Image (spheres, rainbow, N blue to C red):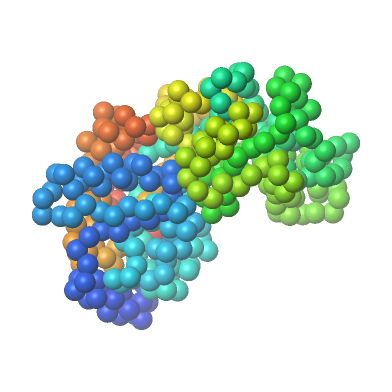
Amino acid sequence: MNKLFITASAVALSLAMSAGVAAARDQVQVAGSSTVLPYAKIVAERFGETFSNFKTPVVESGGSGAGIKEFCKGAGVDTIDIANSSRAMKDSEVESCKTNGVADIQEVRFGYDGIVFATDSAGPDWKLNPADVYKALAAKIAIDGKLVDNPNTKWNQVNPALPDWDIAAYIPGEKHGTREVFEEKMLIAGCKESGGIEAAVAGGMDEKAAESACKAVRKDGKAVDIDGDYTETLARIDSNKQGVGVFGLSFYENNADKLKVADVSGITPSVETVASGEYPVSRPLFFYVKKAHLGVVTGLKEYVEFFLDDQMVGPDGPLAEYGLVPAPDAERQEQRDAFTGGKTM
């Protein structure tokens, strides 16, 4: 992303609002990604236990998009300090922040997660590839070189090796960062594998419109958007033993007694295969810091430094124990240097 240049008016606005922050708030406020939520809660709780002179930060969920939207409302007492996100902030979101006076943003990439497909633990083994997911869940699929309404109602119609189950998939809602990775790594990739892009272009679409068509999800009840967190997806599978859910790797690993995970493109998701890049559906995890609040919201700087310490994000820390795939040593140090050095987006 292009570096944001602070205009004189934005500086004035930040300073004015920062004064309000300093006068009114002594507790860090965080919101955003449901994937990042458990990691941030662990750090916040440890931070509160470690530093008696700082209050435990308030960490809430709501999804990556909702958290970033809240973050970009402005600088001041009524706005959050940090947005958690399971995807990188979009250029349009950066511009929205800038328009509202949030011109100085620190991006922090603190580790990695895999996106997994899982079914009830008592079910059969699953082996998926992107084409299977596209053919099961896309609104339109390529058949005989043309895009047509998806006729598939069972998984074994998509791929004879899959179970004779009615298609019922519980996928992240559009406000979740997980949704974008799901669309890119599975729907669009599967569309390309299946000739969907070629069929769309042959039908008169440009490539951008073709990709949009590829990631459009069917609306006939076979694919259900889940706007809550992964516990809601788990509850859906508990009530429908033939449902397929999309989860973060860490959530699956902490519920492995209830779920059975699918291989994707022949690779079983694990900390090792995500860290190596071998597992194809993985992504970095982020949080974004409102730098206008540093030094004026009590404990914000210290919370970020505590989060980035190897005692938290390193391979032997509590986040890795919960399921985070730690970034390589050099990358972790780079993130610490970027924060202490004042580097912004």
Is any atom of residue 125 visible in this view? yes
- Estimate the x, y position of residue 49 in percent, counting from the top left: 16, 44
| Side (left or right) of 309 relative to 182 | left
In the rendered image, which quarter is residue 298 located in?
bottom left
Residue at the left extreme, as displayed: 53
Residue at 57% across / 28% down in the picture?
A: 119
- Estimate the x, y position of residue 38 in percent, counting from the top left: 36, 42
Is any atom of residue 280 visible in this view? no
| Side (left or right) of 162 relative to 10 | right
Foreground residue among 274 and 117: 117
In the rendered image, which quarter is residue 171 located in?
top right
Residue at the front extreme, as displayed: 239
- Estimate the x, y position of residue 282 in percent, counting from the top left: 50, 36
Residue at 45% across / 23% down in the picture?
A: 257
| Side (left or right) of 26 relative to 112 | left
* Quarter of the C terminus within the rendering: bottom left
Residue at 74% across / 46% down in the picture?
A: 220
Residue at 22% across / 76% down in the picture?
A: 19
In the rendered image, which quarter is residue 117 located in?
top right
| Side (left or right) of 92 relative to 322 | right
Foreground residue among 122 and 246: 122
Is residue 325 placed above or below 214 in the rendered structure? above
